[in-house]
Each structure stands twice: as C-alpha cells, then as structure tokens.
Image (cartoon, helix red, strand yellow):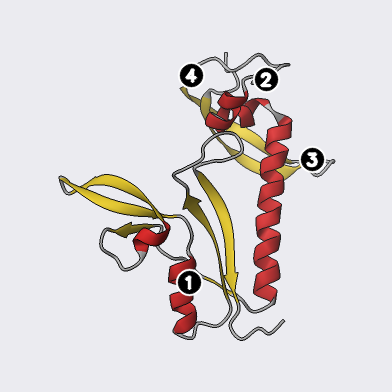
C-alpha cells in the first residue's frame, strides 16, 4: 500500500480533464521507496510552529495553506521579473560565497568555514549583493536587478530566518 510521502515512478501520457486539470494517464508504476517517517495526522497537520519552518517539505505535503503561500511567492517573483524586464532592467547574478581577503567582503558578510581540497578555509556568505552590483553599475552595466539568497548571522527564529531571498535593484542616472 502506498501512502503520501512514499516515492514512486510513473510513466504515461499527460492530458487535461473536462475541468482543465492536468492529469497523468499512468501506463506503468514502479514503487521506489517507502517514506521512513510517518506524516503528521491528516486533519491537524503540523501543529509545532518550529517544525513547520524547519521541515518545510512535510508542511507542504500536509498543508494546502502552506502550498498556496509557496504558489503566491512564485507568482510574486515572476511578476517582479516581468515588471523589471519590461523596464529594460537586466537580471544579474553576483557571487554568494567569497574567499577571505577579497576587498570589502568583510563589511557585509557572514563568516563560514569550509573544507576545500582537504584544507580548512575561511569564506564569507553575502548579506547583500550591493558591493558587487555597484561595481557592475560603475562598469556601465545600465539598470540591473538581482533576486538572490542572502544570509544573516545575528537574529534567528520564526520572524528572522538566517537565510532569505532579497530583491536588490539599481538604475543609474535616475533623478526623482
């Protein structure tokens, strides 16, 4: 018997039902693995708030509300991209991890120690893409934006994630 949380492999043809719901007409099914840990009780879901934030994958399986929040986030990010693209902004990516000794990386970064090729090295996780983006502006890039992960090393908890997504944008020569 398969339960929610188990892994299976399906092969078949995709089609749309009369209500326009995308559906798979499965021709083959192969059980891959059983979910090791039981899911929370169906009707009450995850009641521990901390567990909801630390085990998002479980929360998404059992909570329609959480899935809708994630769908909303996706729509918001898509809208931001299309809005800025329509204004002729260019999306850029700047480094998330920097090596120790890089100029001014220490001003806005979270220190991380990593083993690289067997050696322990100090690296820095960005708290903002500001410095790299301003270098791009100075080199004549024009209007730019970035939707990226940034890290904080101070406050933690439900309202202060140590890792989160940020929109940063710059438009040279704009006079408001």
Label number found at residue 45? 2
Residue occupying the point 40% across, 55% down: 109
Residue pointed to by mark 3: 17
Q: In the image, is 132 to the left or to the right of 22?
A: left
- Callout 3–callout 1 Cβ contact below 8 Å: no
Residue pointed to by mark 1: 133
Q: What is the C-alpha distance between the residues marked 3 and 1?
A: 47 Å
> Residue 106: x and y, percent?
35, 59
**Secondary element type, mark 4:** loop
- Callout 4–callout 3 Cβ contact below 8 Å: no
Q: Does residue 90 sit above or below 114 in this rendering?
A: below
Residue occupying the point 47% across, 43% down: 154
> Residue 40: x and y, percent?
62, 16
Q: Give the image quarter of residue 143.
A: bottom right
Residue occupying the point 48% across, 19% down: 34
- Callout 2–callout 4 Cβ contact below 8 Å: no
Q: What is the C-alpha distance between the residues marked 4 and 3?
A: 29 Å
Q: Badge 4: how crowded within 10 Å, few (<14), some, or many (20+)?
A: some
- Callout 2–callout 3 Cβ contact below 8 Å: no
- Looking at the image, is mark 4 or mark 1 earlier in the sequence? 4
- Callout 1–callout 2 Cβ contact below 8 Å: no
Residue occupying the point 72% across, 47% down: 72
- Callout 4–callout 1 Cβ contact below 8 Å: no
**Secondary element type, mark 2:** loop
Q: What is the C-alpha distance between the residues marked 4 and 1?
A: 46 Å
Q: Does residue 7 sit above or below 130 in this rendering?
A: above
Q: Furthest-left residue in view? A: 118
Q: What is the C-alpha distance between the residues marked 2 and 4?
A: 20 Å
> Residue 141: x and y, percent?
50, 82
Label number found at residue 34? 4
- Kindly report which numbered mark, 4 or 1, lies closer to the viewer in this rendering: 1
């Amino acid at each position: 018997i398969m339960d929610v949380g188990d892994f299976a492999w399906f092969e078949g043809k995709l089609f749309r039902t009369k209500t326009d719901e995308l559906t798979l007409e499965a021709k083959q099914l192969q059980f891959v693995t059983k979910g090791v840990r039981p899911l929370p009780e169906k009707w009450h879901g995850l009641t521990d708030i901390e567990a909801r934030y630390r085990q998002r994958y479980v929360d998404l399986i059992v909570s329609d509300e959480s899935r809708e929040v994630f769908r909303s986030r996706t729509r918001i990010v898509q809208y931001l991209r299309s809005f800025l693209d329509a204004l002729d902004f260019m999306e850029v990516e700047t480094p998330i991890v920097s090596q120790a000794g890089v100029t001014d990386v220490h001003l806005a970064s979270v220190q991380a120690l990593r083993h690289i090729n067997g050696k322990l090295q100090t690296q820095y996780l960005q708290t903002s893409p500001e410095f790299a983006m301003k270098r791009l502006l100075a080199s004549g890039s024009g209007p730019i934006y970035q939707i990226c992960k940034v890290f904080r090393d101070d406050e933690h908890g439900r309202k202060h994630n140590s890792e989160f997504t940020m929109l940063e944008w710059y438009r040279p020569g704009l006079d408001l």
